[in-house]
Amino acid sequence: MNGPIPAGGEAMPSRMNRRAFLAGAAVALAAPAVAMEAANDQSEIFRLIREIDKARDLATAADEAEYDIYARGDRPDYPAVAGQEVPYMFRAFGTKSLNTVKQIDDLFDHYAAGRRRQFEWLAEVCEGGVLPQNHQAALAQQLQEGEDQRQRVQSLYAERDAAYRTWEQVSGHLAAQEVTEARWNVVWALEDRIIRFPCKTLEEVAAKARYIVARYGDVYAREKQHAFIAEVAGLVEAAEAV
């Protein structure tokens, strides 16, 4: 059955009752994919599915090539600064590594805020709510020590990050990442066209259903499955009304 699917809830031809429609749908869904493709070679959705299969192979190959470079023995180690390289008194509980400038700043900001709170509590029990000069000097010294350590750790990070960025350029890893991203973008664009493709024949419906089941046959694809069901719901309702 190769007739077009009615759009916008348009009634189906009177000669097509619900049983005939469902039987035709079952035949189309059960038909071998190769045979269906041969019979519908001009249909855009079959061309898109062929293209995405090739595009996914190219993207997967790019992934593997990128990983081969990443796994080389000359790659500088990450994280950039290990937690144990920071003196214990400046470490927040559970700090294991510092991989960004923000993480470094957050760590030392947390330390400085903790020192200030401690001396604020101390000031509350002092006469007039004012810290003695020696306590004020101690707070200033501790805050300066924190800033000195911040600068030291940031310098370590900058040095190691620069070494890693240089390696990415020289090794070709950065270029490989760009190739991988570009190839997967092609895959996602083709997939979006497949998901949005407006089916007009049962063979196209079957091809789209096969693709969705093959690629998204799990709970993470419910929204795609629901979109497909909504697409053919009007057809089923029209068949039941006959």
Image (tube, helix red, strand yellow):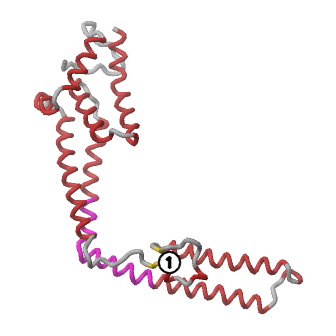
Q: In this view, does 174 lie to the left or right of 130?
A: left
Q: Which residue lies furthest to the right in this view?
A: 127
Stretch in magenta: 156-180
What x and y, as percent, mark residue 217?
33, 38
Q: Single out the residue that lies furthest toward the left.
A: 38
Q: In this view, does 39 lie to the left or right of 226?
A: left
Label 1 residue SS: helix
Specify the amino acid type for callout 1: Gly
Specify few, some or many for label 1: CA neighbours under 10 Å numbering under 14, 14-19, or 20 or more: some
User: For residue 60, which quarter of the picture?
Assistant: bottom left
- Above or below, comparing residue 236 to residue 32 in the picture: above
Look at the picture and state if 126 lies above or below 226.
below
Residue at 25%, 74% in the rendered image: 72
Image vertical order of residue 181 relative to residue 194, above or below: below
| Residue 115 image offset from top left, x and y in percent | 69, 80
**Quarter of the image that includes the N terminus:** top left
Q: Magenta span has 98?
A: no
Mark 1 lies on residue? 83
